[in-house]
Amino acid sequence: MIVFDKLWDTMAKKGLSTYRLREDCGIDSKTIRRLKANENIESKTLNKLCSALSCKIEDIMEYIPDNEA
């Protein structure tokens, strides 16, 4: 399972709110809901997130095997 727990930590460290993601980065509220629920998102969204946060992909998501979730 891919989880986005690291995203929220990285956002807090960088001082970026979900409001700023919506307004400045063009990420809609439906996508933010999907991120919070660890649901599927498009790779272009991952690109937007990494660009907005100036970070690497491993700073916003991680893989956890299903038997550990």
Image (cartoon, grey):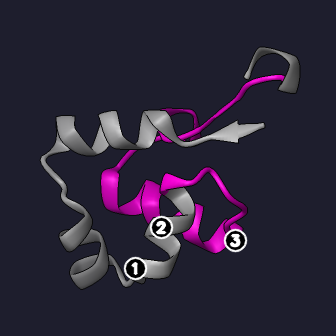
In the image, which disc is placed on residue 20? Answer: none
Quadrant holding the C terminus: top right
Residue placed at 41% from the left, 61% from the top? 51
Give the mark toward the camera: 2 or 3.
2
Which region is colored magenta?
Answer: 36-65
For label 1, the crowd category at 10 Å Cα-Cα, with few meaning under 14, some 14 to 19 and many 20 or more, is few
In the rendered image, which residue does mark 2 sit on? 33
Front position in the image: 15 or 37: 37
**Amino acid type indicated by mark 1:** Ser
**Amino acid type indicated by mark 2:** Arg
In the rendered image, which residue does mark 3 sit on? 42
Asked which secondary structure carries label 3, the reply is loop
Question: x%, y% of residue 35?
Answer: 53, 58
Asked which secondary structure carries label 1, the reply is helix
- Report whether 50 appears left or right of 39: left
In the rendered image, which residue does mark 1 sit on? 29
**Amino acid type indicated by mark 3:** Glu
Residue contact between numbered discs 2 and 1, judged by CB atoms under 8 Å: yes
Q: Is residue 61 above or below residue 52?
A: above
- Report whether 33 appears left or right of 17: right
